[in-house]
């Protein structure tokens, strides 16, 4: 029997009624002769509710206790789904991350999966169960509960697919596939039938929330196919795999992603000397804060300006650290802005087509959209602008690059 891993997101299991519909879908796939492992998220809104409870005690809360708390949302849905499957006459068992042998490192709130002991899941599958596993969570070697970062159930599902050598990893959500951009922002967004892991990884990393980046990273590394599908309507969804089947010319741009979860920090008038970047960014890295875009410009009189972005959640802490560095370096000024958005165009076709960046900048200029930072990679161009510009910018770029066709 082939193993199929299915993952259902929060909206798909937000009520008892929806859980019942999910159970029917699971049973129908089982009736096709497959062994089923089902990974679930918490009910929609639940992880935020738990986070807000914690923040009402301490707005800057992070670490071990937070994970013990926010992992509970998934413990509710695994048991409810297992009960529903049982009521419908099917053998089912729920497993938390630790019961399912999902071992992670000890970076609380954004842990990485180190390995999965697949014996517990296999044992229950062999006994004829549908195995329902809590997404988003794992356990350290020391026995502490960890969570994998927001959207982490996707990663749980892909990692379990790898550990079980599953035939397919199906990610069921509230849209019927991956679109050229978030359909909630751009009514002209089009569904993509097939996309490479390379492009999907870039889209996810740049903010397309439909899949957690680490899930795509895993899929690419171990060559597992992912299919993104709607829980609520029939369809073939979007296949994400290493290579596209068709030999047709690739689209130059495959999609536009955006990320509103970043903040920009700026330090002005620091000495333009070797080692200055590490003096500014070293303390930030020591705080385990990921720095994304970095721009250094040389100003006048041997002084330089330095701008970088960090996750918006880390803004306050990063700002504090930058102010301390500023005193040591006798910088002229420190500034920050946490109402920014990063917009990225992604496409493997950029490798072979010149002029994409200049076209992007001129379209934005024509629409009076001011760019504060730019970064490029082989298959991506990102700009940072004020959050208010998000919808206009995405829509004009979507149209200009014919993504609505
Ligand atoms: P789930 O709870 O099922 O994990 P998410 O909210 O995490 O669902 O992800 C699905 C959402 O991702 C969609 O509702 C959509 O608004 C958003 N999204 C962002 N970018 C894209 C994209 N390119 N294609 C499809 N959906 C996208
Ligand atoms: N429940 C978690 C979250 O809201 C994990 C997930 O949905 O994938 O981020
Ligand atoms: Mg998600």
Image (spheres, rainbow, N blue to C red):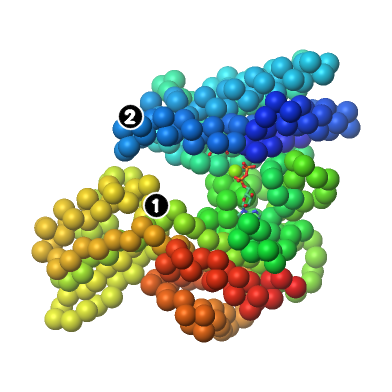
10 Å neighbourhood of mark 2: few (<14), some, or many (≥20)? Answer: few
Residue 258 position within the rendered picture, expressed as x and y whole percent measured from the top left? 53, 61
Residue drawn at the location 45% of the way across and 25% of the way down:
69
- Residue at 52%, 80% (x, y): give it: 367
Q: Depth check: 236 or 232 in front? A: 232
Whether pointer 2 and pointer 1 mark residues with C-beta atoms closer than 8 Å, the reply is: no
Residue 57: mark in rendering: 2
- Label 1, secondary structure: give it: strand
Are there few (<14), some (14-19), or many (20+) residues within 10 Å of tag 1? some
- Residue 89, compared with residue 276, is above or below; it is above
Residue 85 visible in the current orientation: yes
| For residue 288, side relative to residue 229 (left or right) | left
The residue located at (21%, 73%) in the rendering is: 304
Locate the N terminus by quadrant: top right
Residue 380 at x, y percent in the picture: 54, 68
> Which disc is residue 348 wearing?
none
Question: Splitting the image into four quadrants, where does ligand 2 fall?
Answer: top right
Q: Is residue 147 above or below residue 87?
A: below
Q: Position of residue 7 (x, y in %)?
A: 68, 36
Query: Which of 286/259 is in front?
Result: 259
Picture quarter containing residue 246?
bottom right
Looking at the image, which residue is at 34% across and 69% down?
295
Q: Which mark is residue 311?
A: 1
Q: Earlier in the sequence, mark 2 or mark 1?
A: 2
Disc 2 vs disc 1: which is toward the camera? 2
Cα separation, mark 2 vs mark 1, equals 22 Å
212 above or below 11?
below
> In this orientation, which residue lies closer to the viewer: 91 or 54?
54
- List x then y, in percent, for residue 342: 47, 63
In the figure, residue 166 lies in which quadrant? top right
Does any portion of residue 160 appear in the rendered image?
no
Which quadrant does the C terminus fall into? bottom right
């Amino acid at each position: 029997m082939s193993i199929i891993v299915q993952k259902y997101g929060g909206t798909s299991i937000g009520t008892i009624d929806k859980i019942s519909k999910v159970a029917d879908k699971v049973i129908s796939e089982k009736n096709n002769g497959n062994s089923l492992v089902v990974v679930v998220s918490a009910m929609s809104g639940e992880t935020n509710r738990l986070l807000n409870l914690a923040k009402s005690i301490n707005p800057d809360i992070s670490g071990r206790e937070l994970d013990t708390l926010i992992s509970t949302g998934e413990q509710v849905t695994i048991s409810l789904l297992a009960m529903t499957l049982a009521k419908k006459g099917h053998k089912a068992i729920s497993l938390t991350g630790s019961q399912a042998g999902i071992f992670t490192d000890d970076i609380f709130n954004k842990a990485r999966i180190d390995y999965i002991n697949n014996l517990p899941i296999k044992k229950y599958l062999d006994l004829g169960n549908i195995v329902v596993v809590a997404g988003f969570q794992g356990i350290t070697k020391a026995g502490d509960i960890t969570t994998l970062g927001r959207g982490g159930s996707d990663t749980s599902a892909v990692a379990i697919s790898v550990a079980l050598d599953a035939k397919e990893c199906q990610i069921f959500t509230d849209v019927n596939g991956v679109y050229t951009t978030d359909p909630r922002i751009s009514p002209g967004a089009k569904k993509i039938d097939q996309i490479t892991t390379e492009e999907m990884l870039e889209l996810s990393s740049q903010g397309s929330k439909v899949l957690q980046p680490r899930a795509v990273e895993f899929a690419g590394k171990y060559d597992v196919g992912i299919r993104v599908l709607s829980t609520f309507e029939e369809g073939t969804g979007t296949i994400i795999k290493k290579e596209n089947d068709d030999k047709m010319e690739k689209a130059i741009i495959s999609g536009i992603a955006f990320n509103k979860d970043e903040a920009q920090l700026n330090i002005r008038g620091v000495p333009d000397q070797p080692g200055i970047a590490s003096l500014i960014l070293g303390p930030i890295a020591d705080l385990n804060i990921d720095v994304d875009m970095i721009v250094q410009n040389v100003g006048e009189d041997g002084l330089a300006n330095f701008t970088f972005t960090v996750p918006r959640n880390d803004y306050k802490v990063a700002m504090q650290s930058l102010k301390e560095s500023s005193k040591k370096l006798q910088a002229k000024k420190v500034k920050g802005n946490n109402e920014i958005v990063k917009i990225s165009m992604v496409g493997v076709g950029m490798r072979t087509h010149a002029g994409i960046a200049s076209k992007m900048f001129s379209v934005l200029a024509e629409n009076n959209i001011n760019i504060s930072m730019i970064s490029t990679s082989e298959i991506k161009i990102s700009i940072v602008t004020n959050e208010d510009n998000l919808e206009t910018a995405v829509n004009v770029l979507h149209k200009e690059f014919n993504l609505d066709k």
